[in-house]
Image (cartoon, rainbow, N blue to C red):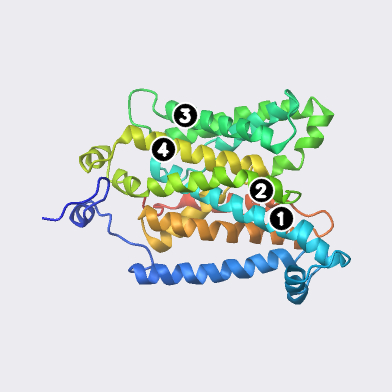
Amino acid sequence: MRTHPPGEVPPAVAEVAGRNAGGVARGNASRIAGLLVLSGVLLMVILLSIGVGARGISATTIIESLWAYDGGVEAHVTVHELRIPRTVAGLVVAPALGLSGALIQAFTRNPLADPGILGVNAGAAFAVTVAIGILGITQPLGYVWFAMLGAGAVTLVVYALGSVGGTRATPAKITLAGVAIGAVLGGVTTAIVLASRDTFDAMRFWGVGSLAGRDFDVIVSFSPFIVLGVLVACAVARPLNALALGNELAMSLGVKIDHLRVAVIVAVTLLAGTATALTGPIAFVGLMVPHVVRWFVGPDQRWIFAFSIIVSPILVLSADIVGRVLLPNGELRVGLVTALIGAPVLILLARRKSVSEL
């Protein structure tokens, strides 16, 4: 008789629970083909992100700047000092946002959950504002710890408020708690920012979410936190598949719910907190990407996580490019573009009778 690793959902159990209802892609071959196609799309978006801006740069010049850099050529300097760091920032931050959204949706079994709606980004932003406006910490490596602390604390508070009354935390209760906590922290954050001109100047671009102006040193320093968050997320993908069947059935399959809860909170804190500290809050990525991915690959979290890591930077870098094209002189910040896209998507999801199965 075949034995299954702890947390793995036996096919017969998944069939009874209706968990084998896949997405558009039928079979792993289709999913692997989808990953390859999306990887090609991501490569094209990366080239566009480096080439498109207030001044267009040809693909030939980009290649020359990479293989034969000349500091006396303005286009080469623009590629090395501005465009590449900006693109790399998107490649680091976007998977963290998409993956944290997929984690929260799977753990809370709430299809409308994402770090922004549940107040996680607001908690990180509030903590960073306190660090900059009250404690005078202006270096990113100084306030990243505050961002992670704020994100983790809000995640715990929202989940606790959603569980008030002795019943299991429901999607509606968690969403309401997240929106309320986010609104309160947003108001306090605004009050702190407006109380000081220096704080306002330091926060005005960070607060709307932007990939611009991030140095390589800062990006490299932040990256280990996100890599660690991705590893933790990958480790809990299989138990989250079992959790989708219900707490009792998941425990019968060997899932330790308390350990899983701690691991998910740690992963979300690392991913959302670090991403917010690096670029500011970029909303709706964690909501939109898992939904689109789940529609294609089905409810298996392992595939959802893998696709989210590829699709999220496609969305964020594309939004950043659109912002440069629409407002070439001042640049529309990427956080504003994703918000303009995400708000209609959220309304569409809320109006649907059924959303992608969790």
| Front: mark 3 or 4 | 4
Cβ–Cβ below 8 Å for labels 1 and 2? yes
Residue at x 59%, y 32% (from the top left corner): 123
Q: Which residue is mark 2?
A: 219
Badge 4 density bin: few <14, some 14–19, many ≥20, Cα 10 Å: some
Q: Residue at x 39, y 24 (%)?
A: 164
Out of 175 and 56, give the one closest to the viewer: 56
| Residue in the picture at 48% in, 48% down | 230
> In whole angstroms, how far apart are the C-alphas of marks 2 and 4?
24 Å
Report if residue 111 is visible in the image.
no
Q: Is residue 290 above or below residue 123?
A: below
Residue 205 in the image: state x and y as whole percent.
Answer: 76, 43
State the CA–CA distance, disc 3 to disc 4: 12 Å
* Residue of label 1: 85
According to the picture, the residue beneath numbered tag 4 turns out to be 263
Q: CA distance from mark 4 to mark 1?
A: 31 Å
